Image (spheres, rainbow, N blue to C red):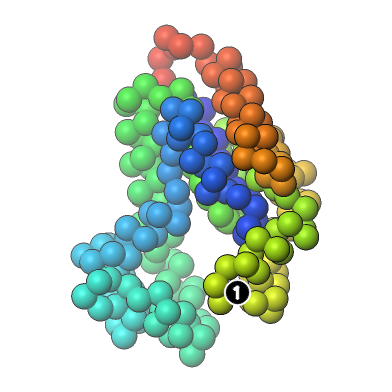
Amino acid sequence: MIVLGLTGSIGMGKSTALAVFADLGCPTWDADAAVHRLYGPDGAGAREIARLAPDAVGPDGVDRSLLRAAILAEPALLTRIEAAIHPLVAEDRDAFLAEARIAGARIAVCDIPLLFETGADNWLDRIAVVSAPADTQRARVLSRPGMTEAALDAILAKQVPDAEKRARADYVIDTSQTKDHARGQIEAIVAGLLAEQPAGEAPDA
């Protein structure tokens, strides 16, 4: 089984691209969705946050706004949270990949927003980056409710620059045109990966 990592800076269309991979029959895993599950009621992540920042957890699980406020008040808290949550996310991902292998999947796609930042490129087989021109990216993000120029700049400052992502990726998916154009690129990626692992071969261990 080939494990493809999907990443891209904010506003580049990563979620849309992941949906296309799923539509083409690839099992998909979303890191943000995994955190959402872990932060839900009775989630393992919620229990960890309750230990580290008890005021940020209620009946519905972790309240993201209260958690952000706690981190702003105590910046060192972020390191402790990451140390507690990242292993749980990794366990969720590994369980997904194990299930995909058992099911005989030939390609599995992992959507990892901070792929390069967290060193995930060390264990992935291939990497695809979604990309668009900076002005397109800014227009998309600034159209979101509550988003400001300052907030966007702060987010981008924490991410590997788009140009570096593109240089380090095996595939670049241009999302600046139509959805059909992006889909065509993704179809070509899937076709190429399937050609590397013909049907009938035993899944990797």
Residue shown at the point (46%, 67%) measured from the top left: 82
* Picture layout, residue 97 above or below residue 46: above
Where, by quadrant of the figure, is residue 100 drawn? Answer: top left
Provide the residue designation for mark 1: 147
Amino acid type at mark 1: Met
145 relative position to 129: left or right: left
The x, y position of residue 84, in whole percent, is 39, 66
**Foreground residue among 159 and 22:** 22
Q: Is residue 188 above or below residue 56?
A: above
Instruction: Answer left or right for 105 relative to 197.
Output: left
Q: Position of residue 183 (x, y in %)?
A: 60, 33
Q: Is residue 65 above or below residue 172?
A: below
Question: What is the quadrant of residue 171 in the picture?
Answer: top right
Q: Is residue 130 left or right of residue 104?
A: right
Residue at x 32% of width, y 73% of height: 62
Residue under the image location 30 percent in, 82 percent down: 54
Q: Name the secondary structure under disc 1.
A: loop
Where is residue 113 shown, x and y percent of the image? 56, 54
